[in-house]
Image (cartoon, helix red, strand yellow):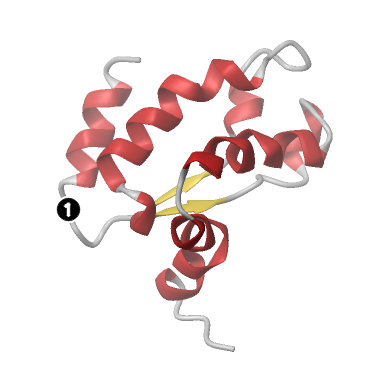
Amino acid sequence: MEPWATDIRRLAAFPNVSCKVSGMVTEAQWHAWRSADFLPYLDIVFETFGADRVMIGSDWPVCTLSAPYGQVISVVTEYIRRLSIHEQEMVLGKNVSQFYCIHG
């Protein structure tokens, strides 16, 4: 986890920095990872950035080297079920819209 955790905390100290949760499965052992493997990393990201500065990403199509798209996305969607509906909406799209100035 170190120095990654310390570096993430340093980045999160800047209020203008957001975090996209993406590409995790291709950094793990392909086809052998479990969602629980990512919990400590997701805990740090959400503790430091908060749901208002985290956005979901899939790393598609690269992620499919390690697992099907649905399984990849479920790592984050299952994790955020513990959050409020508003926070889930932020992570699943509203933060992306705000960060990239996408209005529709």
Instruction: Report the quarter where the N terminus lies.
Output: top left
Secondary element type, mark 1: loop
Q: Is residue 93 left or right of residue 68?
A: left
Q: Measuring 23% from the left and 45% from the top, which residue is drawn there? A: 12
Instruction: Give the image quarter of residue 69.
Output: top right
**Residue 20 at what x, y percent from top left?**
47, 49
Instruction: Report the quarter where the C terminus lies.
Output: bottom right
68 over 27 or under it: above or below: below
Q: Measuring 74% from the left and 39% from the top, which residue is drawn there? A: 62
Instruction: Give the image quarter of residue 79.
Output: top right
35 over 7 or under it: above or below: above
Instruction: Give the image quarter of residue 32.
Output: top right
Task: In this rendered view, identify the residue nearer to me: 37 or 64.
Answer: 37
Q: Measuring 50% from the left and 66% from the top, which residue is drawn there? A: 96
Task: In this rendered view, identify the residue nearer to me: 82 or 38.
Answer: 82
Query: In the image, what residue type sits under mark 1?
Result: Phe
Q: Measuring 73% from the left and 47% from the top, which residue is drawn there? A: 60
Residue highlighted by disc 1 = 14
102 over 1 or under it: above or below: below
**Residue 41 at what x, y percent from top left?**
42, 26
Q: How many marks?
A: 1
